[in-house]
Image (cartoon, grey):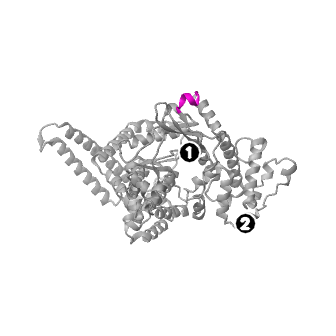
Amino acid sequence: MPIRTIGVISRTYRHINRYREIIAILVKYGFGEILAKLELPKYLNFGKGKSKRFILGKTAAEIATASRWARVRMALEELGPTFVKFGQIMSTRPDMVPRELIAELEKLQDKVPPFPTEDARRIIEEELGSSIGSLFRDFSDSPIASASIAQVHKAVLHDGKEVAIKVKRPGIDRIIETDLEIMLHLATLIENHFEKELGIWDPVSIVNEFARVIRKELDFRIEAAHIERFATNFQTDKTIHVPYVYREYSSDKVLTMEFIGGLKVSEIAKAVSGEETKVRNYGIDPKVVAARGADLVLKQIFEHGFFHADPHPGNIKVLRDNIICFLDYGMMGSLSARHREALADILIAMIEKDATKITRTILKISGYRYMQIGDSEKLESDIAELIELYAYRPLKEIEIGNLLHHIASVVAEYRLKVPPDFYLLAKALVTIEGVGKELDPEFNAMEHAEPFAKKLIWARMSPRRLIKDFYLSALEARLLVRDLPSEARDILERLQQGEIKIKFEHEGLNPMLETIDRASNRTVFAIVLASLVIGSSLIVLSGVPPKWHEIPIIGIVGFLAAGIIAFGLLFSILRHGRM
């Protein structure tokens, strides 16, 4: 059976050793039976001697009492940074991963011992092209933080400014690339040997998507761009502070940014239980921090469409007077304007108990039309049951995390595909809701989300938005009218040359012609309507006399004519019973 893979996994010493290590760990945690079905010895040359005694299916007795999902989590932790990152990302995908496994994956720890400071100094000097002494007035030998991909050192620039220097681990790129090749090979084998069990899931595509995400996180220049974009989005907001990036001291392996002091959210949470001295000294109110943090995340989602995908307590610091500062911009989510509006529709429809609207919105963002799915009525019924779970609860009792998990379960059941960033968004909202409750037991994310969703929906009806939509529609209609003759001529030429052959029987053609004629008339009316609205708007703005109450009369007449045409067109559509 042909195997899709990359590299030369079975022929390189490095890959074989790492592959052997990965399989040994998976066997240790009780997954040998699955590995045996993949027929791995057929594709891997395990060599001679000890490796020949490699036995698939051997389970370590010391982990026999752990649950299957706990063993998955423990195996990922032992497999190293690539697999830990994979587990963390998969914890945001309730459409692919059972909730029991998600609960375990959320426990994955990304803390590892620091690498030697000498290596950090060497990398900084190689990347920035100068010695540590010439770059910094002071450099801390002990890292202030350490994770699987990088560690952070504190330093002082020659002008006295304190900075945090994020340095990538030596050789981490090679380690991750090796693991990615092995993961892709395993995913390919799983596809070939478990085709029936997988259904619509595509392990190779999942690994490829993960590879794209983690490679972006490995390039600190991308993270620097994320921080700068974030700072631009919030440049007028006084409730948030975004770290300054020192580009001249940064590269793809080194990221130098402003050092952030303040308090961790975990320290502030202790104030809720009585340890308030340090928090009072900083002028911090936990309830204000909870509300501001939630509003900032919601503003990122609904207004900017660019959001911090992992706002856990370790990634948030609070400065004096309740100023919020997010850290670690390696993982960010992005939503288009259309998807932001869809999310707003879902939240408002949930509040208004409109199952039909939620169903239509979910199908729309999944790439389906409403009538294309045969069991759409059953989907709507399941959505209605979901709404009933929340229908008679006060808004303050609805947890947005549970709501999104329930919706994700329904989406997964019907095997609908939604953009991956929707799951990052759900993860962000669930995380910030948990942080909010730590700081303020009465905190409710749904109450904070409702005004943002309503504001986005009302923005659709603003005159500027309507004029813009009419203008774009008019442009599309103009392009259609302009290109139609040449396109039709091209089709006729192809017909004459025999490249296109059409065979049809004339039967009941008149109703179709009437429908086309009616559609053409409506299109013309729509173009005239758009032209009247745009023209009248321009006249009103220009202030051409004569005027009535300081508004040009010609513009008023144009708007009245547009209104009459619009109502006439709407009446025609409703009379024929078709939208």
The answer to whether any part of residue 180 appears in the image is yes
The residue lying at 63 percent from left, 33 percent from top is 122
Secondary-structure class at tag 2: loop
Q: Which residue is mark 1?
A: 144
The numbered mark at residue 243 is: none
Residue 404 left/right relative to 83: left
- Looking at the rendered structure, the kind of residue marked 2 is Ala
Q: Which residue is mark 2?
A: 64
Q: Where's the C terminus, which quadrant?
A: bottom left
Closer-to-camera residue (454/533): 454
- Residue 231 image position (x, y, % from top left): 42, 41
Which circle, 2 or 1, is nearer the viewer? Answer: 1
Q: Is residue 248 above or below residue 565?
A: above
Specify whether residue 135 is painted magenta: yes
Query: Gap between marks 2 and 1, in whole Å?
Result: 37 Å
Badge 1 marks a residue whose secondary structure is loop
> Mark 1: few, some, or many residues within 10 Å (few <14, many ≥20)?
few
Task: Find the magenta span and give its range.
Answer: 129-137
Whole-percent x, y for residue 396 in the image: 38, 66
Name the N-terminal-most of marks 2 and 1: 2
Give the residue drawn at x 67%, y 61%. 71
Residue 359 visible (yes or no): no
> Local crowd at mark 2 within 10 Å, few (<14), some, or many (≥20)?
few
Picture quadrant where residue 384 is located: bottom left
Place of residue 529 in the rendered image (x, y in percent of width and height, measured from the top left) = 27, 46
**Given the current orientation, which residue lies at the most extreme right position?**
49
Q: Are marks 2 and 1 in contact (CB under 8 Å)?
A: no
Q: Give whichever of 18, 257 is nearer the camera.
A: 257
